[in-house]
Image: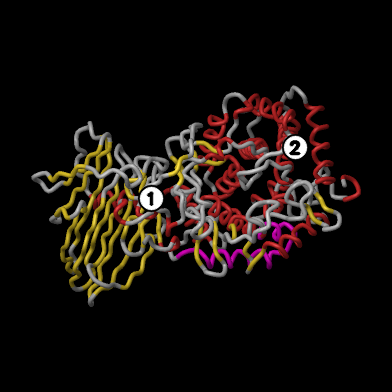
């Protein structure tokens, strides 16, 4: 049985990542990339599907932390009067990815046990394992090879590699597991102590660039480090999470592969990185986005691989039981082929925000115009929506709002940066037409609220984005009515559910957890209307549900107090960064995106009178 989701910590090298449980077991690792097959897959099955445990042989009391300003995990075990620490990290990659584990005796003598179960292909393939004269262990299967270097004696037992050893006070022992291509020569042994020193220095230098120094800075910096770990460094793409198939609902089938890069997170990510001082990462992500969408406009996808790959065929892994028997386990993501109109708004918005930050004018504008020309032909179509519903397409209100954003931001780019547009007057007409249609068909006058989709009587949390993207001012009575309705229907203990029904239009009550990014969006709304007291209350509630090392999942069960969904979730950490900055600087990401500057009148191009556009 795997550990609770909140009991895992993250280590990584900015190209892949591993999850380490409190019991010293590394239960998830994909090599050589985030989206590669896993060689440790116990997270989704049993230890027989691959794991690497290193812990005291008997019972122990555990505490852990990240070394300050790093992604280096230090787990301290108190066992039988002795104390030992295990330091886990992934060094910056020169050529081969590797995990280093350093065991240090702190007090007394502790008997340690190591259980290494190497399985390639998501737990399916048992490698051929040999031990060289120098004690190095080599495991090979097809193109894959793992090499374990340590001075600790090893033995094979039932297709596991086992070690039992004593650690005395002041003693240090190390383990280095390196992945590579089986046709290459064996990698040279590294120096774990030097690797630890270099890795610590690199992380500290990187986070020292953070320009935010206000309240909650430790929480903000931890989230930024998590985001950096989820950036695929060769390209700048940011994976949504390093895991697949951690369930959004316990024991159920809402299990998706999140080891890819979603376009809809782009503007939140760009603004958060820019406001925190990480313009290089923001610029690299923008470039990844534009390379990924390059091509025929009608072929734009919801998500892409870390290098911009488009072929993300979804398939089920029958030999894995799933996290706590939540099946199926899925690899790939069929949502990549859905029609989701909000993507066009995200691309236009991220380009506008990037131009504004860099004071740069026409970069990528030809491609943006091509996307908008295509959108002008399809914006009236129903789509699958932000929540990627696998069923009937609908006219989702949020999707239509983001088509308005696409035209609005491109028009604003033309006006601000004096760009030449092929159809500017037509775009202005479409922008106004979309706005009128949404206010007519997406707003229910009896409810006094915008609704999930045209004709619906339900709200969903995506409507929180209407004021955040500047569709209407946050003080507009229609927005206030929508927020009131969301709070009545979807909020539990200051945490926001995505929607009230499992399936839009269905009749079953929703049993999934609160969607954490939406909860941050609610705090951002309150900051926009000047209710910083409420926004801080929500923020503190969200910070309180971080795990012991400051990580957040996709969802949270308010009743059971457990994390749900893929972990750690990039969008949750992006939202945390943005909300903290929104609360503590003059014009943060939410005000920049919405146009609702502090102390400034509402922008003239936002229809704030219900009679004008309803």
Residue 220, magenta (yes or no): no
In the rendered image of this protein, does residue 282 appear above or below residue 546?
Answer: above
Q: Secondary structure at mark 2?
A: helix
Magenta residues, start to end: 523-547
Residue 538, magenta (yes or no): yes
Which numbered circle lies on residue 408? Answer: 2
Q: Nearer the viewer, mark 2 or mark 1?
A: 1
Q: Residue at x 17, y 46 (%)?
A: 137
Q: Residue at x 83, y 46 (%)?
A: 439
In the rendered image of this protein, does residue 81 appear above or below residue 212?
Answer: below
Between 315 and 513, the residue placed more toward the observer is 315
Q: Give percent across and percent down for residue 540.
A: 58, 67
Q: How much space separates mark 2 and mark 1, taking CA atoms?
A: 46 Å
Q: Residues within 10 Å of mark 2 (few under 14, many from 20)?
A: many
- Indicate which disc, 2 or 1, sits on the residue closer to the N terminus: 1
In the rendered image of this protein, does residue 230 appear above or below residue 61?
Answer: above
């Amino acid at each position: 049985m795997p550990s609770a989701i909140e009991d895992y910590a993250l280590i990584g090298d900015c190209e892949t990542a591993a999850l380490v449980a409190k019991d010293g077991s590394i239960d998830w690792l994909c090599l050589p990339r985030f989206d590669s097959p896993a060689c440790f897959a116990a997270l989704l099955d049993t230890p027989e599907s691959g794991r690497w445990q290193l812990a005291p042989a008997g019972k122990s009391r555990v505490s852990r932390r990240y070394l300050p300003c790093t992604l280096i995990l230090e787990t301290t075990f108190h066992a039988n009067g002795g104390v030992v620490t295990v330091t886990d990290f992934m060094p910056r990659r020169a050529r081969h990815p590797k995990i280093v584990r350093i065991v240090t005796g702190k007090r007394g003598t502790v008997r340690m046990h190591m259980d290494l179960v190497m399985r390639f292909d998501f737990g399916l393939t048992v490698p051929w394992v040999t031990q060289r004269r120098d004690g190095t262990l080599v495991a090979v299967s097809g193109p894959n090879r793992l090499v374990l270097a340590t001075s600790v004696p090893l033995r094979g037992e039932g297709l596991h590699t086992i070690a039992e050893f004593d650690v005395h006070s002041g003693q240090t022992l190390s383990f280095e597991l390196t992945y590579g291509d089986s046709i290459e020569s064996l990698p040279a042994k590294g120096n774990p102590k030097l690797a630890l020193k270099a890795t610590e220095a690199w992380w500290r230098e990187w986070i020292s660039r953070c320009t935010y120094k206000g309240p909650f800075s430790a929480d903000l910096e931890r989230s930024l480090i998590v985001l950096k770990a989820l950036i695929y460094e060769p390209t700048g793409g940011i994976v949504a999470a390093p895991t697949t198939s951690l369930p959004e609902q316990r024991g159920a089938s809402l299990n998706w592969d999140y080891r890819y890069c979603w376009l809809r997170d782009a503007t939140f990510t760009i603004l958060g990185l820019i406001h925190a001082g990480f313009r290089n990462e923001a610029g690299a992500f923008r470039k990844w986005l534009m390379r990924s969408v390059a091509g025929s406009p009608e072929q734009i996808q919801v998500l892409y691989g870390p290098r911009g790959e488009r072929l993300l065929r979804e398939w089920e892994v029958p030999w894995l039981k799933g996290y706590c028997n939540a099946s199926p386990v899925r690899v790939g993501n069929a949502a990549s082929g859905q029609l989701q109109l909000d993507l066009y708004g995200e691309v236009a918005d991220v380009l506008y925000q990037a131009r504004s930050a860099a004071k740069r004018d026409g970069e990528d504008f030809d491609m943006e115009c091509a996307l908008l020309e295509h959108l002008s032909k399809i914006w009236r179509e129903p789509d699958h929506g932000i929540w990627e519903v696998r069923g009937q397409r609908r006219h989702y209100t949020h999707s239509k709002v983001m088509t308005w954003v696409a035209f609005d931001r491109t028009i604003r780019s033309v006006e601000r940066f004096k760009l030449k547009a092929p159809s500017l007057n037509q775009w202005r007409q479409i922008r106004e037409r979309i706005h009128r249609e949404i206010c007519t068909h997406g707003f229910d006058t009896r409810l006094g609220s915008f609704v999930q989709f045209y004709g619906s009587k339900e709200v969903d949390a995506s409507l929180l984005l209407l004021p955040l993207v500047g569709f209407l001012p946050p003080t507009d009575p229609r927005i206030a009515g929508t927020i009131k309705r969301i709070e009545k229907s979807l909020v539990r203990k200051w945490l926001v559910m995505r929607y009230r029904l499992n399936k839009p239009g269905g009749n079953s009550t929703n049993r999934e957890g609160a969607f954490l990014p939406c909860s941050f969006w609610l705090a951002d709304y309150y900051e926009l209307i000047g209710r910083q007291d409420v926004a801080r209350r929500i923020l503190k509630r969200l910070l309180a549900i971080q795990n012991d090392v400051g990580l957040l999942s996709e969802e949270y069960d308010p009743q059971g107090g457990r994390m749900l969904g893929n972990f750690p979730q990039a969008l949750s950490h992006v939202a945390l960064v943005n909300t903290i900055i929104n609360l503590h600087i003059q014009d943060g990401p939410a005000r920049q995106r919405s146009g609702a500057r502090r102390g400034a009148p509402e922008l003239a191009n936002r229809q704030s009178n219900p009679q004008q556009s309803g």
